[in-house]
Image (cartoon, coloured by chain):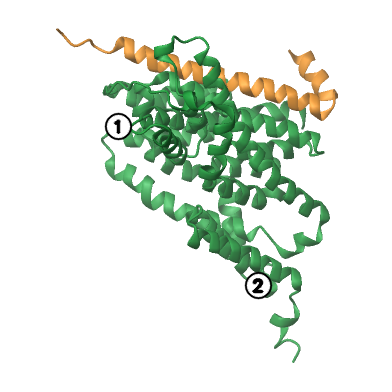
Amino acid sequence: MDDLILSLAASGPFAQAVAVTIGGMTGVFATLFIFYLIIKAFEILKPKKEG
Amino acid sequence: MEQLFIGFTSVSYMHFIMYAIGGILIFLAVKFQYEPVLLLPIGFGIIIANLPLSVIVEHDGAPGLLSTLYQAGIANELFPLLIFIGIGAMIDFGPLFKNPFMIFFGAAAQFGIFATILLAVLMGFDLKTASAIGIIGAADGPTAIYVANKFAKALLGPITVVAYSYMSLVPIIQPPIIRILTTRRERKIKMVYHEEKAPKALLIGFPIFVTMIAGFVAPISVPLVGTLMFGNLLRESGVVDRLSRAAQNELANIVTLFLGLTIGSTMRADQLLDPVFLKSTLLIMLLGIVAFVFDTAGGVLFAKLINLFLPEEKRLNPMIGACGISAFPMSARVIQKMAAEEEKGNIILMQAVSANVSGQIGSIVAGGLVLALVPLFVK
């Protein structure tokens, strides 16, 4: 991972911007997916109404 | 004698251009109510800071009111973070908890940020400046101010003004993009809404867990996420109503007032002499609108992609994808209006609000990730 970052840091700004784009979009989706799981977990753990 | 008329002799035509810019912002705020809470103080800040000798900024080497406020609240990012506490106290995550899947639109609609970063780099901006410009696509004023202050201090004024101006133009920017990307049949899709109360434990636990996860994923995002979620915890706990109301009203209002005035004061006549600054400002205006267009397109296209995997009766109205931006509740209102225009009685407001609330979370997460990723490549 460090090698990849170092090689990107040494490359041009466009390659860096592409890396920020891929990392950023993946990161946003991944983080919000965790938040989604939290909401779902609370839904599952919610006590069910009888009847 | 010369000293008596120093007010008249120390100004140039550029000062008058700045008065005109300040006047235009005040006009837009008063006449069209374009983000008046911010644009009015910014407009007045521009005028007052560009008056002869700029005494309110600095006098005889001593800091004036506006430079004191700048050091106290902008240079150290205090003001945007305090505003986040107020915004957090205003957000109701309830609609999102009823439609949790909508949270993904809050991610998809951040595409504008990253598309704009790519475009800005292609236009010759360095990665840090490009990122500060791209964050306009967060459609979230305090996040734009926070990131711009870290990555492109010199362009803080133009970035802030452009961000708030385009946020107020959401009703004009979004509809044509949505119409281009969707068919009339898609815009008529009805969605079922299930009314269900979110459990109290979720309302209280959500802001705490979100802050902790943000702290692990991108520690640098904690000031942004943490302040927003702290405000929300005040609201949802139900035991500190006084603090919640103070955050929503007194805190948010007072800080917004100082923030606008101070940001306005960063826009000075001498900058007009700098052709690089002028060119950058014009490009920021262009890239800002690009960011909003790509945000809208990202959300709508993501909804259309999801629809490919859903049965006919469960399809989403792709317009709600456009609500994944942070401009709340304006974007949700725009989409509901469009849905009702396409077919009378089609109500998708609650789904739109859910996506819109997700956009508020998505924008600060995206801001935090940009803050974490960019320094990996550029010191």
Residue in the picture at 73% in, 64% down: B269
Q: x%, y% of residue B23?
A: 59, 66
* Residue at image mark 1: B237
Among the chains pictured, the one given orange colouring is A
The amino acid type found where label 1 is placed reads: Ser
Q: Nearer the viewer, residue B298 or B314?
A: B314
Task: Specify the amino acid type for callout 2.
Answer: Leu
B372 w.r.t. B313: above or below: below
- The residue at which mark 2 appears reads as B51
Q: How many marks?
A: 2
Q: Is residue B220 visible?
A: no
Q: Colour of chain B?
A: green
Q: Chain of mark 1?
A: B
Up-down relation of residue B22 to residue B304 (above or below): below
What is the crowding at mark 2: few (fewer than 14 residues within 10 Å), some, or many (at least 20)?
many
For label 1, the crowd category at 10 Å Cα-Cα, with few meaning under 14, some 14 to 19 and many 20 or more, is some
Q: Measuring from the top left, give residue B336's x and y in whole percent.
A: 41, 35
Q: Residue at x 50, y 30 (%)?
A: B324
Numbered disc 1: secondary structure: helix
Residue farthest toward the bottom in the current orientation of the protein: B1
In-front residue for pair A23/A1? A23
- Specify the quadrant that holds the C terminus of chain B: top right
Distance of label 2 from label 1 (alpha carbons)? 47 Å
Give the residue drawn at x 48%, y 23%: B186
Q: Residue furthest top?
A: A51
